[in-house]
Image: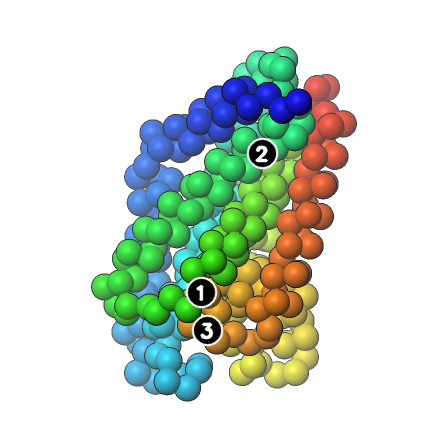
Amino acid sequence: MINWRGMNKLFVKEVLRFLKVTVQTIITPVVTVLLYLLVFSSVLSDHVEIYKGIGYTAFLVPGLIMMSVIQNAFANNSSSLFQSKLNGNILFMLLAPLSDLEIYIAYTGAGIVRGFLVGIGAWIVSCWFVILPVHNPWILVCFTLIGGGILGSLGMISAICSDKWDHIAAFQHFVIIPLSFLSGAFYSIKILPDFWQKVSLLNPFFYLIDGFRYGFLGRSDISVVTSFAIVLGCFILVSFLCLLILHRGYKLRS
């Protein structure tokens, strides 16, 4: 049986943790999106058209929203879990009557909530530049949840495997951020040479952003069904890996 009360307490604790520093966890990422929009929309909006009849700013906004969601879901779980390891208070969570699955759901859920809130803030800010149509709200919700879940799981994995803050920073700056920027958030992969198009298709973040963009614009570089299948497979894979590490207690119970 699932310990719903304990899992809910851990989830609420994690949500309240990042809400206490809203300027750092919510407002700052939204301001970053605003800066991207100020630069790119003012410079390229009148000169670049990716999809016929759709301005560059409208193309850009969904990519920025999803990029903010996934980066903040990762940052939330990696920083929170590693801080607990560093302070030694992770012992109280491990001693509590919580299973590996319950811990995983609580942390991943909190990461999704933070990513979702940042995404909503980025969407509100983007309305000053362009009012986006919503082609399919269910697609938007599905890709947001799965994207937050994937990066929330990766955040937990990086926190468990890291021995110091430098390791988490390295994972974020050399893996998460490059994959985010090279995922088609700022451009369509169809304008790339054939070789780089094939390389882009190896990036799982591309499918998150391309599918999410379809939810707004009804246009995408590849089939939204293909994107959904791939990101769902990635979610299952990283979730299994995270649960396996939690179950074995790697660098948690030693």
Residue under the image location 62 percent in, 20 percent down: 98
Q: Is residue 71 left or right of residue 56?
A: right
Residue under the image location 66 percent in, 61 percent down: 230
- Mark 3 sits on what residue? 218
Nearer to us: label 2 or label 1: 1
Viewer-nearest residue: 200 or 128: 128
Image mark count? 3
For residue 165, what is the image quadrant? Answer: top right
The kind of residue tagged 2 is Ile
Please give the label number shown on residue 105. Answer: 2
CB atoms of marks 1 and 3 within 8 Å: yes
Q: Secondary structure at mark 3?
A: loop
Residue under the image location 61 percent in, 83 percent down: 193
- Mark 1 sits on what residue? 136
Q: Check disc 1: other Cα within 10 Å, few if <14, some if 14-19, many if 20+.
A: some
Q: Secondary structure at mark 2?
A: helix
Q: Check disc 2: other Cα within 10 Å, few if <14, some if 14-19, many if 20+.
A: many
